[in-house]
């Protein structure tokens, strides 16, 4: 039977750089111990106090259909949090609760793009971005950044890509690079959106993982609140990846239409999950800091290890649970290096190529295993890279 063009072309074709990840999973299934530094998921589980809140809600009967836009308590809590953190007046009318940030990304593009419209995104990018845009019927167009610019988009690249586009998707703190967009970059992003009448879709799911500087939400910039849809999630801030709870914050007219979309697609998020999210978001900043702490620690460990060698370069990053490492001195590309590391040392990392062309020659390391094992794996990775680089230099001579 015929399957739609939309669904059969979602992945865009070609190698997506995820071969190393699947090879690692296959090795594990066959009994090999593999150190996985691949997926962006905490090594801790959801906090027992959040689970207890979820249990209370579920056993208390909150298991029926929940209100499609989200329960009032969660919409209010998310609105208050955004208002307090950004200064932008925000009420429940600005908020739609979604089954995670991924569903929010899809819904946001559905809300602003007509079929065939051009939707911009920044390369390197979170792996689902182009497929999400295609799923919404739009055409993805990448704005390629450079390692030398810490993968921040240049103003001229933004201005060049913008004419004729409908939306621009940015992500700060960034997956895969860990870079946090500075005020100047966000000002250029805002200017581009105003100049070219673009919607801005701002993926802020890592907003609690900032190790240096501060997270700035572009919705707070002049003239942006009416043209910005912010993507938020409980996944990373509260280690609730499996609970599937996130949100879109935006202008009430857009949220109203997005509620129509939710009615006809997801039909809401389980009530007991939303109750647990209210509990988690009102539990105070300490809980968020506790959940983020392991990544902060491991980043320090990584800095110390990387400072002792000169072969692997670190992209200066300020947030999120990842490190982007430049391994070009080895003479290999990201995929070649990641494959060799997996086969030789049973350490799995993501090739930069999995996140677009801009990150070729790099690898992404997720800081998602316990500290000692993380430090040991990173040290081994550096030694391996140094050996390869020495070989590479000999061959070149
Ligand atoms: C940048 C970014 N956006 C969105 C998501 C989606 O997260 P979730 O659907 O779990 O909220 C992820 C998950 O890894 C991500 O890295």
Image (cartoon, rainbow, N blue to C red):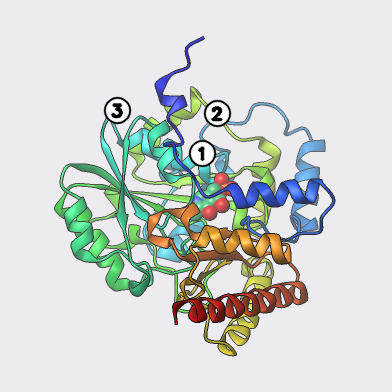
How far apart are the two marked residues, 1 and 3, measured between alpha carbons?
18 Å
Q: In terms of secondary structure, where does tag 1 sit?
A: helix
Disc 2, ligand 1: is the CB inside 8 Å? no
**Mark 3 residue element:** loop
How much space separates mark 1 and mark 2, taking CA atoms? 9 Å
Q: Kindly indicate whether the residue at mark 3 contacts the one at mark 1 (C-beta within 8 angstroms).
A: no
* Residue located at (33% from left, 67% from top): 146
Q: Of callouts 2 and 3, which one flags the residue occurring earlier in the amino acid sequence?
A: 3
Q: Quadrant of the C terminus?
A: bottom left
Judge: label 1 CB < 8 Å from ligand 1. yes
Q: Are marks 1 and 2 in contact (CB under 8 Å)?
A: yes
Q: What SS does tag 2 mark?
A: loop
Tell me how far mark 2 sits from mark 3, CA to CA: 21 Å
What percent of the width, then of the height, locates residue 140?
33, 41
* Residue under the image location 21 percent in, 51 percent down: 161
Q: Is residue 206 visible?
A: no
Reading the image, the residue beneath label 3 is 115
Which mark lies nearer to you, 2 or 3?
Answer: 3
Residue 45, placed above or below residue 214: above
Mark 3: few, some, or many residues within 10 Å (few <14, many ≥20)? Answer: few
Discs 1/2, front = 1
Marks 1 and 2, the one that precedes in the sequence: 1
Residue 282 in view:
yes
Q: Is residue 77 above or below residue 309?
A: above
Which residue is denoted by mark 1 in the rendering? 103
**Residue tagged by mark 2?**
266
| Residue 221 picture location, percent across and down | 28, 63
Mark 1 vs mark 3: in front? 3
Question: In which quadrant of the rendered view does residue 95 lie?
Answer: top left
Q: Earlier in the sequence, mark 1 or mark 3?
A: 1
Circle 1 Cα neighbour tier, 10 Å, few/some/many (<14 / 14–19 / ≥20): many
Label 2: how many Cα within 10 Å (few below 14, some 14–19, many 20+) = few
């Amino acid at each position: 039977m015929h399957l739609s063009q939309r669904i059969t072309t979602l992945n865009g074709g070609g190698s997506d750089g995820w071969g190393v990840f699947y090879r690692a999973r296959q090795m594990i299934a066959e009994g090999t111990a593999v150190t996985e530094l691949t997926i962006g998921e905490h090594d801790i589980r959801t906090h027992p106090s959040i689970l207890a809140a979820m249990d209370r809600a579920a056993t208390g009967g909150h298991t029926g259909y929940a209100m499609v836009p989200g329960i009032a308590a969660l919409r209010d809590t998310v609105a208050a949090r955004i208002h307090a953190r950004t200064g932008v007046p925000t009420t429940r009318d600005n908020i739609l609760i979604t089954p995670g940030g991924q569903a929010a990304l899809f819904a946001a593009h559905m809300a602003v793009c007509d079929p065939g419209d051009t939707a911009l995104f920044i390369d390197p990018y979170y792996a689902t971005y182009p497929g999400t845009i295609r799923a919404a019927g739009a055409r993805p167009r990448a704005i390629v950044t450079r390692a030398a610019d810490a993968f921040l988009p240049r103003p001229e690249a933004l201005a060049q890509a913008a004419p004729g586009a409908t939306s621009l998707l940015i992500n700060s703190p960034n997956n895969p690079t860990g870079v946090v967009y500075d005020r100047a970059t966000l000002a250029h992003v805002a200017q581009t959106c105003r100049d070219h009448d673009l919607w801005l879709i701002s993926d802020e799911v890592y907003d609690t993982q900032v190790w240096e500087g501060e997270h700035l939400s572009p919705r707070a910039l002049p003239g942006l609140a009416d043209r910005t849809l912010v993507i938020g999630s409980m996944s990373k801030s509260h280690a609730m990846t499996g609970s599937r709870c996130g949100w879109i914050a935006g202008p009430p007219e857009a949220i109203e239409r997005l509620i129509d979309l939710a009615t006809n697609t997801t039909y809401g998020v389980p009530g007991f999950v939303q109750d647990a999210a209210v509990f988690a978001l009102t539990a105070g900043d300490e809980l968020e800091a506790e959940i983020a702490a392991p990544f902060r620690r491991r980043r320090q460990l990584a800095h110390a290890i990387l400072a002792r060698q000169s072969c692997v370069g670190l992209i200066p990053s300020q947030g999120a649970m990842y490190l982007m490492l430049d391994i070009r001195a080895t003479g290999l590309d990201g995929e070649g290096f990641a494959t060799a590391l997996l086969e030789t040392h049973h350490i799995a990392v993501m090739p930069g190529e999995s996140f677009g062309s801009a990150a070729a020659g790099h690898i992404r390391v997720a800081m998602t295993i316990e500290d000692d094992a993380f430090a040991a794996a990173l040290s081994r990775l550096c030694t391996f890279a140094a050996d390869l680089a020495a070989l590479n230099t000999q061959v070149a001579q």
